[in-house]
Amino acid sequence: MSTTHTSKYSVYGPPRYQGTHRFRRFPKVRPVYVGLGALLAVATACGVPATPDAEPGPAVTTTAAKAAGIGEGQHEVGTDIKAGTYTTTVPADELNCYWARVKSFDGELTSIIANGNLAAGAKGRMVVKASDAGVIFQGGCRWVKAAAK
């Protein structure tokens, strides 16, 4: 016994896509990872202050480890920091630590020679060269000059 199909559609029903949109290709979206220093540099160049206008809370000093080493800020090579190899370990209570070697302190992305983000608990190592204008550290890391071998 044979049955005939009398609908104007195929046995699978009406087409779900009509028109040209069914063949349209959309570009693939890929994530772009930007360091915190790059975001701050762009924000500063656009006139956005690096810190909110909120009142600062009381200063928190924890252990002697906070007193040792070089902390957050912009440090000029030869004046504030010497050329050499520096190491750090990110405290477990810190979100991350950012470091950057820069050609100048003008806030431009092209001034960054090298940079990186370290997650909580990670160990970091960087080499500051005498030809660098300086380094930028952000976060609660304390950078200590490694012993010469």
Image: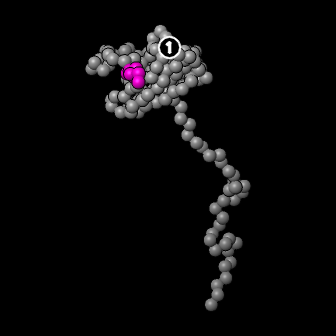
Q: Quadrant of the N terminus?
A: bottom right
Name the residue furthest bottom: 1
Q: Predominant secondary structure in magenta?
A: loop
Residue 147 in picture, x, y percent from top left: 38, 22
Residue 22 in picture, x, y percent from top left: 68, 56
As drawn, is 36 to the left or to the right of 60? Answer: right
Residue at 54% x, 26% y is 114
Residue 4 in picture, x, y percent from top left: 67, 82
Residue 145 picture quarter: top left
Start-end of magenta stretch: 142-149
Residue 107 at least partly seen: no
In the image, residue 147 lies in the stretch drawn in magenta? yes
Check disc 1 and report its element: helix, strand or loop: loop
Q: Nearer the viewer, residue 143 or 4?
A: 143
Residue 80 in picture, x, y percent from top left: 45, 11
Q: Quadrant of the C terminus?
A: top left
Residue at 72% x, 57% y is 19
In the rendered image, which residue does mark 1 sit on?
Answer: 77
